[in-house]
Amino acid sequence: MRNAALVLGIIGGIWAMIVGFFGYGYTTFVEQHGAIGEMGKQVDHPMVIKAASFLAPVLAIAGGAMARSQNQPAGVLLLAAGAAIWFAFGFNVFTMFPIAFCGLGGILALAARQPDTH
C-alpha cells in the first residue's frame, strides 16, 4: 500500500503541477493585461489560486516521496494536497484526477500498517 501511495502521490503531484501552471499563469496574465471581455475576468481570490498552484504539487510530490518511509505524515500531506486543489480550483474535468490520486494515495498511506515488500 505504501508503494501505491508513492506512485499515486507523484502522479497526482505532476497532474496538480500542470493544473497549477495554467491557474497561476491565467491569474498573472489577467493581473498584467486586465480583463478580456466576459471570458477573461479575474477570479475572486487570485492569491488563493497562486498559493494552491504552488503548494499543492509540492505537498503531493513530497507526500508521495516519503510514503514508503514515513507513511502517516505522507498521508496527511497527500490529503492536504487534494483538499488544496479542490478548494482552489473546484472539482472539474481538469482537477478530478489530481484530487482522486492525492486522496486515494493519502488514504492508502494512512491505512498502511507494515512496510511493503521490496
Image: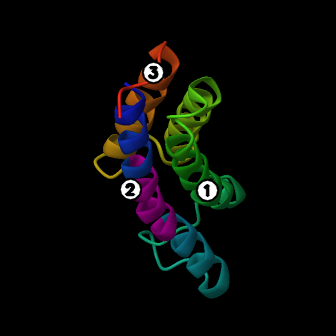
Relative to residue 4, is residue 12 depicted above or below? below
Please give the range of residues in magenta: 12-22
Between marks 1 and 3 in the image, the one whose residue lies nearer the viewer: 3
The residue indicated by pointer 3 is: 107
Quadrant in which the C terminus is drawn: top left
Tag 3 near tag 2, CB within 8 Å = no
Relative to residue 10, is residue 25 depicted above or below? below
Q: Is residue 27 visible?
A: yes
Q: Position of residue 67 (x, y in %)?
A: 52, 35
Q: Determine whether, in the image, residue 33 is placed left or right of residue 1.
A: right
Q: Earlier in the sequence, mark 2 or mark 1?
A: 2
Q: Position of residue 54 (x, y in %)?
A: 62, 60
Mark 2 nearby-residue class (10 Å; few <14, some 14–19, many ≥20): many
Kind of element beneath mark 2: helix
Q: Determine whether, in the image, residue 1 is placed left or right of residue 61.
A: left
Q: CA distance from mark 2 to mark 1?
A: 15 Å
Q: Earlier in the sequence, mark 1 or mark 3?
A: 1
Q: Nearer the viewer, residue 50 or 54?
A: 54
Q: Position of residue 55 (x, y in %)?
A: 64, 53
Three-letter amino acid code at the position of disc 3: Ile
Three-letter amino acid code at the position of disc 2: Trp
Residue 21 colored in magenta in the image: yes
| Residue at x 52%, y 19% (from the top left corner) | 110
Kind of element beneath mark 1: helix
The residue indicated by pointer 1 is: 49
Q: Position of residue 82 (x, y in %)?
A: 50, 37
Q: CA distance from mark 1 to mark 3?
A: 25 Å
Quadrant in which the N terminus is drawn: top left
The residue indicated by pointer 2 is: 15
Kind of element beneath mark 3: helix
Relative to residue 74, is residue 113 depicted above or below? above
